[in-house]
Amino acid sequence: MPAFSISTVLQLAVALGLLNVWLVRAGSTTSYRGGSARSLKEEFAAYGLPDFFFYLVGALKIGSAIALIAGIWNESFVLPAAAVVALLMVGALVMHAKVKDPPMKSLPAFLMLIMSASLCALALT
């Protein structure tokens, strides 16, 4: 088993957070959904995004989550996966701003951006 590190903790936090949102709570109402959306798919519609974006972003986030978990054993997966998540979180923050959500709705995306950016920085050192 690889050594326990801050990178491992961040990888698991980001990965499990993404998997929770996309596989467990995608159909659930939360206080962080954009606009007045009651599900993840409705959230993409609230942002004015076409349906295929929902599937594309979902595939990128689930794939990145799996890569971050695999990165515990193979570090070469961490930087690309964390970079993808960081870019997607920037997009999420832009979408929240687009629909004029209160800042609290953007908090999960902001925290995921900070964790993903930290993973990128750690992978580059």
Image (cartoon, rainbow, N blue to C red):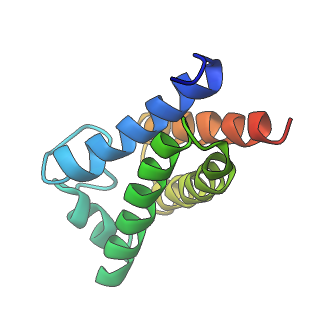
The vertical placement of 118 against 76, above or below, is above
Q: Nearer the viewer, residue 32 or 21?
A: 21
Residue at 31% in and 45% down: 19
The x and y percentages for residue 76 are 67, 50
Q: Nearer the viewer, residue 20 or 70?
A: 70
As displayed, is residue 9 above or below residue 92?
Answer: above
Name, please, the residue furthest toward the front.
1
**In the displayed structure image, the side of residue 5 where residue 51 appears, left or right:** left
User: How far from the left and from the top, in percent, is residue 49?
Assistant: 38, 77
Q: Residue at x 36, y 36 (%)?
A: 16
In this view, which residue lies farthest toward the right? 125
Q: Position of residue 61 (x, y in %)?
A: 43, 57
Placement of 104 over or under 45, stated as above or below: above
User: Left or right of 52: which side holds 92?
Assistant: right
Residue 71, visible in the rendered structure: yes
- Which residue is the extreme one toward the top? 4
Looking at the image, can residue 103 be seen? no
Up-down relation of residue 125 to residue 90 (above or below)? above
Quarter occupied by residue 13: top left
Residue 98 location in percent, x, y?
A: 50, 63
Q: Quadrant of residue 59?
A: bottom left
Which quadrant holds the C terminus? top right
- Say which of 6 and 26 sits in front: 6
